[in-house]
Image (cartoon, rainbow, N blue to C red):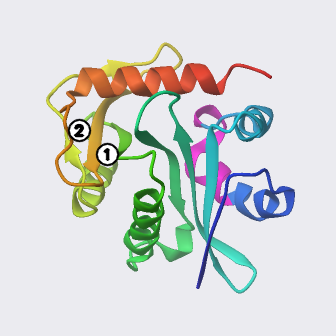
Amino acid sequence: MKFITTKQWDEDLWQKTRNIYNVAFGEHATKPEKIIRNMFARGLSALHVLMEEDKVQAMALTGTIPNSRVLVLDYFAVHKDMRGQGIGKEFFDYIKEWARSEPQYNRILVEVECDETPGNLARIHFWEKCGFQLLDDYKHCYKWGPQNYMAMILNLKGKTATPLNGEDCLKFMASFHKESYKLV
């Protein structure tokens, strides 16, 4: 297996990746491709993939929040035929080590749907196995969807000077989403 990270738009790699992205998140939860391209053009995003031969087995889009030390895990998906085999954890460990090697990051932030459904609880459990901590009980609902979200955080370099709560983290996420949709 081969891990790839790029901070530049790579059309060929995206074409190999986009099916996993679309299947995992559906048309209502994905960002339009022109927005993702714009995020790359503005230096806000990186694409991470796990390849086996010439096939993408897992993908993630991460984002940078300007003037913060937070890496946002915006999208993360494993090919449906590869789930339950430890690939997601292995892939996330790669992303975590990549983030540790980037001096601007000291935390990774992910938001999770928190309505108590079996799927949501399984995702929260997965992120906890990866080292994330679910933050307090602050819930946020975006105007474009009915789901409630909570923040999970992973400190990359030991304890950080300023602890964050769920509301602060979800403000970071909202800021990231707002920046993502600004056009060049």
Q: Is residue 156 left or right of residue 179?
A: left
Q: Is residue 68 left or right of residue 163?
A: right
Secondary structure state at the residue bearing disc 2: loop
Read off the residue under disc 2.
116
Read off the residue under disc 1.
120
Residue ranking furthest to the front: 103
Majority secondary structure of magenta residues = helix
Quarter occupied by residue 164: top left
Callout 1–callout 2 Cβ contact below 8 Å: yes
Residue in view at x 35 percent, y 25 percent = 170
* Residue type marked 1: Asn
**Vertical relation: 162 (above or below) 57:** above
Given residues 103 and 29, the one toward you in this image is 103
Residue 17 in sight: yes
Q: Position of residue 28 (x, y in %)?
A: 62, 32
Q: Position of residue 175 (x, y in %)?
A: 49, 20
Residue in view at x 28 percent, y 43 percent = 153
Image quadrant holding the C terminus, namely top right
Quarter occupied by residue 180: top right
Residue 139 in sight: no
Image quadrant holding the N terminus, namely bottom right
Q: Position of residue 3 (x, y in %)?
A: 59, 74
Residue in view at x 80 percent, y 34 percent = 34
Report the span colored magenta: 20-29
**Vertical relation: 41 (above or below) 178:** below
Q: Is residue 53 left or right of residue 3?
A: right
Residue in view at x 41 percent, y 75 percent = 90
* Residue type marked 2: Glu
